[in-house]
Image (cartoon, rainbow, N blue to C red):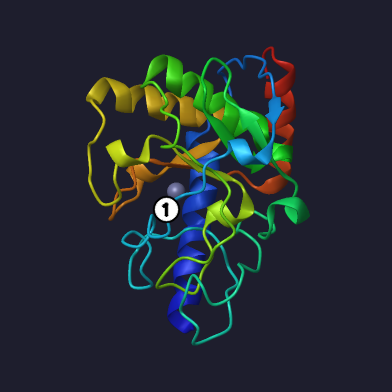
Amino acid sequence: MAVRGQKERSALRSAKRFVAEELDERLEAEPVVLDEVDPSEGTQPPEDWDTHAHQDDEDVWEGVETSAAPGKSSFEAAPAKGRSINGFSVGPAKRIGVKTYRVPGTNVSLSVRAIIAPLLIGFAKEFHQKVEKLRKGWCWGHANRNIRGSKRPSFHAAGIAIDLNAPKHPLGRANTFSVAQRKTINALCKKYGLRWGGNYRRRKDDMHFEVILPRAKAVALAKRIQKGGAR
Ligand SMILES: [Zn+2]
């Protein structure tokens, strides 16, 4: 337990650094149109999609403090419980306000937490335009699961993370994007207040993008981005 506490403190420090140093406040926000669709339009990730990235002995930390019952180190053991380190509860879609939206200009729909949806949907839209075309069935968001082999639920359980074109950017493989693509991804992450799994220090997770701002700041940024204009 002590070890996990230490990991969480170090992750919290790194999240604070991210907010202080990396979020580029000067970037102008474009309005994001939210096109809500039926939840069945969203894709559920495969059962084993996060198996390798998130072992308890990894330095990769997904941001959720509390856990399922001790000893039940499983994904299947219990629904995810707790709260992400930036203050978002985890749980079933309806309870935590997850809705499904079509990414503008694509046939891809993502299930994400409504209150921060402009951050993830706006990012996905620009990713499709500027980095790589999104492919239906390869992208997903909310999944109310604990991480297999770990006692922690992931940011996906809070509806604040998405995986894009997962089969092309598998877990644990670094540099699945070109230098130019990486540069664009990093700029877009700053604009939308996201952390990219491709920047995890050890095990890379190129497909993964998560809202890392503290809850109040993330919600405020989402509102500004939905309206559009300079922030
Ligand atoms: Zn992910």
Percent from the top left, x then y, of residue 115?
Answer: 74, 39
- Front-lying residue, 43 or 159: 43
Name which residue lies at 58% across and 77% down. Answer: 68
| Quadrant where the image shows the C terminus | top right
Quarter of the view holding residue 164: top left
Q: Is residue 210 visible?
A: no
Percent from the top left, x then y, of residue 208?
Answer: 42, 43
Which residue in the structure is indicated by mark 1?
A: 46
Name which residue lies at 75% across and 51% down. Answer: 94
Name which residue lies at 28% across and 55% down. Answer: 203
Q: Is residue 215 visible?
A: yes
Q: Secondary structure at mark 1?
A: loop
Q: Is residue 44 above or below residue 102?
A: below
Q: Is residue 207 above or below residue 3?
A: above
Q: Is residue 100 above or below residue 68?
A: above
Q: In the figure, is residue 148 to the left or right of 121?
A: left
Percent from the top left, x then y, of residue 37?
Answer: 69, 30
Looking at numbered disc 1 in the image, what kind of residue is underneath it? Pro
